[in-house]
Image (cartoon, rainbow, N blue to C red):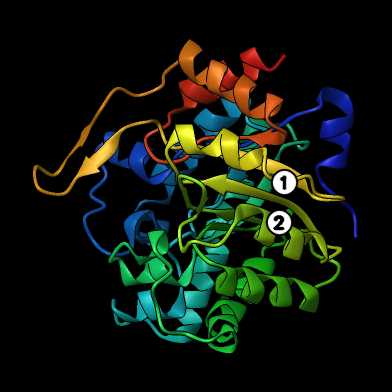
Amino acid sequence: MKNPFTAILAARGVVVFDGALATELERRGADLSGQLWSSRLIADDPEAIIAVHLDHLLAGADVISSASYQASRLGFSQLGLSQAAADALLTKAVELAKDAVRRHGDDSRLVAASLGPYGAVLADGSEFTGDYPLSVEQLIEFHLPRVEAALRASPDLVLFETLPSMAECEAVAQLAARFPDVPFMASFSAKAGTISHGESFASVVARLDEVPNVIAVGLNCSAPGVIAPLLKTTAPKRVVLAASPNSGETWDATSRQWEGTPYRGDSFGALARAYVEAGARIIGGCCRTRPADISAARLALK
């Protein structure tokens, strides 16, 4: 298996991922009020997705993530789509990201096929708790068609994001082992001191460090302040550590608005440097981060 990060790490020491996709689309006027979030736009407005991908590439991202985080047979069935149609849309999401790279004109940029946890398709916040009663085998059964659909478009890697628990970590570890020639990456949601379900970050890193084609393990969709302390709790033998924080704002469900002061520009760049000092070699952004923040991180990490 060829590690797509090797050349970037050798040249610059840090791989820069993109920032938020869904919240950036929403900021630009997209209606993402349904359960499928940005996945709905794969068919309805693909150019809007490509435009955000291109802006992240222009900002200096080495890797962009496809708009397939929420995409699954179960989720698309709520729109009346067949399994084949659902799989085709997930494949198309990866193709849209690859199209953005082609339009940008730099074939050294990478595409990660983004796949969210089982809890994301429930749209009830359980991706931040891991409290769903599925066995590891059932989680594999849910995710396997998604991986297969993503691979039809030949992404550079498969990225599982916002995983909340050791159970879903184990499912991803076993899935990755079924595709030994495909690079996988896994990223977890976290709270202070642990990943969201309560297990240690070090324990999921250790489990995935055992799988030869898992190339990176990280933290995403989490408050900026919880990430650096967790990065310092582990020293993997092989995988690279990653950090993609939220902007620092929090969603108030009562007022239905974002609150708090976001990290922007230089302050986001300072965050990126702090994560690198804590051991991360992959830096990106999650909810409410913008292309300009990725540009600031790129500059701060030079």
> Measuring 81% from the left and 42% from the top, which residue is drawn there?
5
Along the horizontal axis of the image, is 131 left or right of 69? left
Q: CA distance from mark 2 to mark 1?
A: 7 Å
Marks 2 and 1: CB-CB under 8 Å? yes
Along the horizontal axis of the image, is 182 left or right of 227? right
Along the horizontal axis of the image, is 220 left or right of 179? left
The image shows a total of numbered marks equal to: 2
Q: Position of residue 273 (x, y in %)?
A: 63, 20
Residue situated in front as seen by the camera: 15 or 128 = 128
Q: Quadrant of residue 258?
A: top left
* Dot 1 amino acid type: Thr
* Dot 2 amino acid type: Val
Element class at badge 2: helix
N-term-proximal mark, 2 vs 1: 2
Q: Position of residue 8 (x, y in %)?
A: 82, 33
> Measuring 52% from the left and 76% from the top, which residue is drawn there?
87
Q: Nearer the viewer, mark 2 or mark 1?
A: 1
Quarter containing the C terminus: top right
Q: Kindly identify which residue carries mark 2.
A: 205
- Toward the left, the furthest residue is 255
Q: Residues within 10 Å of mark 2 (few under 14, many from 20)?
A: many
Image position of 91 with respect to 281: above or below: below
Q: Kindly identify which residue carries mark 1.
A: 234
Element class at badge 1: loop
Residue situated in front as seen by the camera: 98 or 56 = 56
Image position of 199 with respect to 246: above or below: below
Along the horizontal axis of the image, is 89 left or right of 44? right
Q: Position of residue 181 (x, y in %)?
A: 86, 67
